[in-house]
Image (spheres, coloured by chain):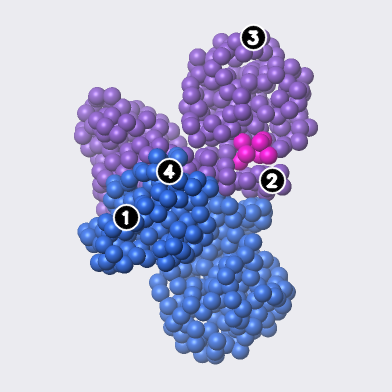
Chain colours: A purple, B blue
Amino acid sequence: MANNTFKEIAEVLLNAQTILIFPHINADGDAAGSASALCHTLRELGKTAYILIEDQIPANLKFMDRGYFTFDDKVIEHPDVSICVDCGDFGRFPKRREKFISAQTTVCVDHHGTTEEFCEFNYVDPAAAATGELVYALIKEMGAEPDVETGEAIFTAITTDTGNFQYSNTTKNCHIIMAELFDLGVDTNKVSVEIYENERPEKLMITTRALSTLEIFGGGCGAIACLTLEDMKEIGAEPFETDGVIDNLRSISGVEYAAFVKEKEPGVIRVSMRAKRRGNVAEIASQLGGGGHVKAAGCTLNMPLDEAVNLVKSKLNEAIKEL
Amino acid sequence: MANNTFKEIAEVLLNAQTILIFPHINADGDAAGSASALCHTLRELGKTAYILIEDQIPANLKFMDRGYFTFDDKVIEHPDVSICVDCGDFGRFPKRREKFISAQTTVCVDHHGTTEEFCEFNYVDPAAAATGELVYALIKEMGAEPDVETGEAIFTAITTDTGNFQYSNTTKNCHIIMAELFDLGVDTNKVSVEIYENERPEKLMITTRALSTLEIFGGGCGAIACLTLEDMKEIGAEPFETDGVIDNLRSISGVEYAAFVKEKEPGVIRVSMRAKRRGNVAEIASQLGGGGHVKAAGCTLNMPLDEAVNLVKSKLNEAIKEL
């Protein structure tokens, strides 16, 4: 798709007075951080700006919300600009679609490779590790001076989307931006404590429960763990609180394929898969009716949990033979 | 203490032909990474250089050993220079002390605040996040071109000692160095997989076992977990494989004090404590005969495990009342 320049998008925002910002549903650090940095900057520039959401942002990201996030789609009746951040398509903000397109001008800033051109102005860069990187460049292009609050939100966006600078999407530019944030006086450790040391005990308990089912197979190249609906209910865990399980499985030496199998509803099983160095889970997920990336993919299976575990293990065992 | 300049230390190394490098016992990523980067560079410069150790380096750091590490203190009979990295005093390489001081010239490069002046040439900077930062500067001062191998070792040193750029010791300089490493072509993700996705299943199992004992107390401000000697034996875990438990405890929302209590031998109990934002565990550890930093401290108690747990809880409960 053809990108606009940051200059063009900056002008659109500078010429507007009322701006609504749209992060995606199940907002992560990048979506919430990009939205917060942008909202704060726009307000500093004298604009009326809000972040419109349709579901709660996670508790550990709420430190960024200084009156920015709202469920009230009447907060700005007829926005001059709607800008979505970190959203590849309308499906990423389904209940806010009508409001989004009601603006005079629509803008998309994103780093997902799959982004469709659904806005009037677009800046999509799949080489960016985080949308926060792009928002940071846009803020500077607008002639705004990034401050500590902006910096905290940009740090959140980049550190969470790069797995704390460990994932393969991490770039030189991420570290250059971080160096600049230190000049702004951002206390990255303080922010990190907010993001990462803010878990409910239930998260620890459900992770522990899942890992207690650990099974290593395929000559040590496969690791699998599972959770029943009963486990989730008994512990009172939220669905997103099982997010870390799969990374724990992949951390095992020798494991090239990891799978986490979770009963969402009776007979509805969510499967997450990861490859470490050589494997390709996108292919396996696709065979099972799902999809994703080479190193991280998933699918949903309609069968009892134990059948799903066996099916996934047999698929991974086939893949392990080809390593 | 009075530091020498990097230039002076670089000259000492450039004028030497045979150099022995001394990382500390229980080498971590910073010690092993600093030593590896230095050894590789010295060999590239035509020197005879080895890293002398007295205990095994952890499996996840062995990727850096390209024939550098040796237990053989005869590998260089009379070294021109002995240089210790990341070591605050002789106690950090107790069995190698005689060999160290047998060199014509001794050098210390370190970032620990407690470093004594026990070498002829010293560069000690407690403001550095990692000794790897200092070694990187020294390598450049020597006029050597850092290459990918050097860069991988420096990345290891800095990312491990900063908790992946999340700890409060992280500086602007860490990120500036990281940006330079990308220019060298370092694949930081590949290295990260070596460091962090190389755990024995026993580590996951012992962590799970410990977390299954999680108890929250003090109105949600305290978290404690424990392990018996029997747990360790049953699972077959190595002592260092319980390292991550305490971080898991501190990650809980609301928890300001976390403690992990482990039976080392019957009646000998090792206690690790962490404070999150406001607390001071150095003080508590000191009351119990131990010591450490404000946010991370520990002690050893001679009593049965359950008594130790109760004692630590009562101490932390007192501290929680003062928050």
Looking at the picture, which amino acid does disc 1 mark?
Answer: Val
Mark 4 in CB contact with mark 2 (< 8 angstroms): no
Mark 4 packing: few (<14 Cα in 10 Å), some, or many (20+)?
A: many
Q: Taking B81 as reference, is A308 left or right?
A: left
Q: Which residue is mark 1?
A: B309
Describe the element under mark 4 as helix, strand or loop.
Answer: loop
Percent coordinates x, y for residue A126 in the rendering? 58, 35
Q: Main secondary structure of the magenta part?
A: helix
4 vs 2, front mark: 4
Q: Which residue is mark 4?
A: B221
**Same chain check for tags 4 and 2:** no
The quarter holding residue B88 reads bottom right
Is residue A260 placed above or below A96 in the rendered structure? below
Label 4 to label 3: alpha-carbon separation: 44 Å
Looking at the picture, which amino acid does disc 2 mark?
Answer: Gly
Q: Chain of mark 3?
A: A
Label number found at residue A77 = 3
Looking at the picture, which amino acid does disc 4 mark?
Answer: Cys
Label 3 to label 1: alpha-carbon separation: 59 Å
**Same chain check for tags 2 and 3:** yes
Label 1 to label 4: alpha-carbon separation: 16 Å
Describe the element under mark 1 as helix, strand or loop.
Answer: helix
Percent coordinates x, y for residue A202 in the rendering? 35, 37
